[in-house]
Image (tube, rainbow, N blue to C red):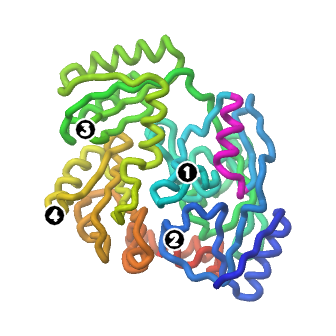
Amino acid sequence: MAGTIKPRSPTELRQAVEWGLNDGVTLDVRGQGSKLALGKPMTCDQVLDLSGISGIVDYAPEELVITLRAGTPMREVEALLAQRNQMLAFEPPDLGPLFGQEAGQGTLVGALMGNLAGPRRISAGAARDHLLGFSGVNGRGEAFKSGGKVMKNVTGYDLSKLLAGSWGTLAVLDEVSVKVLPAPDQTRTLLLLGLCDEAAVKAMCAAMGSPHEVSGAAHVDGRTALRLEGVTPSVEARLKGLRDLLTGAGGTMEELGTLESRAFWRDVRDVVPLAGKDGAVVWKISCPPTDGPGVLARIKAQRPAARCFYDWSGGLIWLALPPSPDADQALVRGALAAGHATLIRGDEAVRRSVAVFQPQLTALAALTARVKESFDPKGLFNPGRMG
C-alpha cells in the first residue's frame, strides 16, 4: 500500500517532488480525493496529499478575483463568495453523489484540473476560461508561475489553458487565482413539457440563438428547461420574449421561480438524475447539439434501457448504461459522427479495460506526449490516469 506525503507549504511541496524525482517515486496527486474514481486506475508509490496546503490567500470582491491554495475545499470557496453575493460563473459540478459519496467533498483546483463546468458553460465559458494564474511545481522539480490576477496579463504561452483538463498529470499546483462574477438577483426557468428529443434540441438552439441571454438549456425527463438570470425587470422582459419566441415549439409551458430554479439547475450540474447505486456506467458525451438526438437513437436501438439527459443546449449528453465488461465503449463512440465521449463512472475493472478518455488521433497523441515529456519527463504525476 502506498504511503502518504502531506506537505504543508509550497516549499515542502517542492521538496516532496524533488525527492520523488531523485528516487524515482511516482506520485498519486490528490486534493480531497473526491475524483479518484474518474480516470484509469493508478498504481503509485506514494500519495501526494495536498489537503494540508489550504486556505484563502486573497479575495478582492471589487476586482472579481479570488486566490486560494490547492487543497481548499470547494464548499469554503462557495461560502465565502456567497457572503459577497458572488459566484464561480462556470458552475463547477459536485460529482460526489454520482460516485456514491457525500456532497461537498471536492476542491476548486480539482475541478480546474478536470476542466469541469456545469450548465452555464454555454454562456460563461469553460473552467479554463476562469483560471487567471497559478503557481506550482513541474515534474522536473522546478517551481514556476503563470498568469496573474487580472484577465489581460498573458505573455507567451497561456499555461492555464494547458493545465486545465490535464488531471494532475503535468504539474502539481499549490495556488490558483480565479475570476468570479456577481451572483444574479433573480433566476427563472421556462419549462416546455412533453417535447421529443429533436423538438427539445431545436427549441434550446432557438433560445440560445435569441437575444434573451439564456444561461442554461437542458432537457431532462421530458422537461425542456431554459434559464434566465439577472435583475428582476430584465428577467421578466426576457422571459416574456422567450415565451413569445417558443409559442410554436410544441408542448405546454410552465415556469420555475428562483428557489425552484436553483434547485433544478444544481441537480443538472451535479448529474443527480443519474446518481444512485444501480451499478450503471455513466458516459459524458460532447457533440454538436443537433447531432445529439441521432447519437442517442443509435445507442438506444441496441440498449433500450439507457437513461440520459441533455445539457449545454444539447451539446452535452449524460448517459447511463447497464453494467457491462467493456462499458459498451464501441457502441457509444461508434454512435458519434463528431465529438468525444468520456467514461465518468465505472468500476475499477471496467476502467482498466477501456479507454476512459476519448482516444486521440495520431498527430494529437504525439503532441500530447511531447507536452508530457516537457513538463514531467519521468512520469512522476498520476502515471497512467489518462491512459
Label 4 neighbour load within 10 Å: few <14, some 14-19, many 20+: few
Q: Which of marks 4 and 2 is nearer the N terminus?
A: 4
**Residue 363: percent from left, percent from top:** 42, 72
In three-dimensional space, the C-alpha distance between marks 4 and 3, rounded to whole angstroms, equals: 21 Å
- Residue at mark 4: 302
Q: In this view, does 343 lie to the left or right of 334?
A: right
Picture residue at 77% right of the left edge, 39% below the top: 59
Crowding near pointer 2: few (<14 within 10 Å), some, many (20+)? few
Q: Which of marks 2 and 1 is nearer the N terminus?
A: 1
Report the span colored magenta.
70-84
Of callouts 3 and 2, the N-terminal one: 3
* Dot 4: element: helix
Indicate the position of residue 374 as horizontal and vertical percent values.
Answer: 64, 74
Quadrant where the N terminus is found in the figure: bottom right
Q: What residue type is labelled 1?
A: Ala
Asked if residue 375 lies in the magenta stretch, the reply is no
Q: How far apart are marks 3 and 2 (CA)?
A: 40 Å
Q: Mark 1 points at which residue?
A: 103
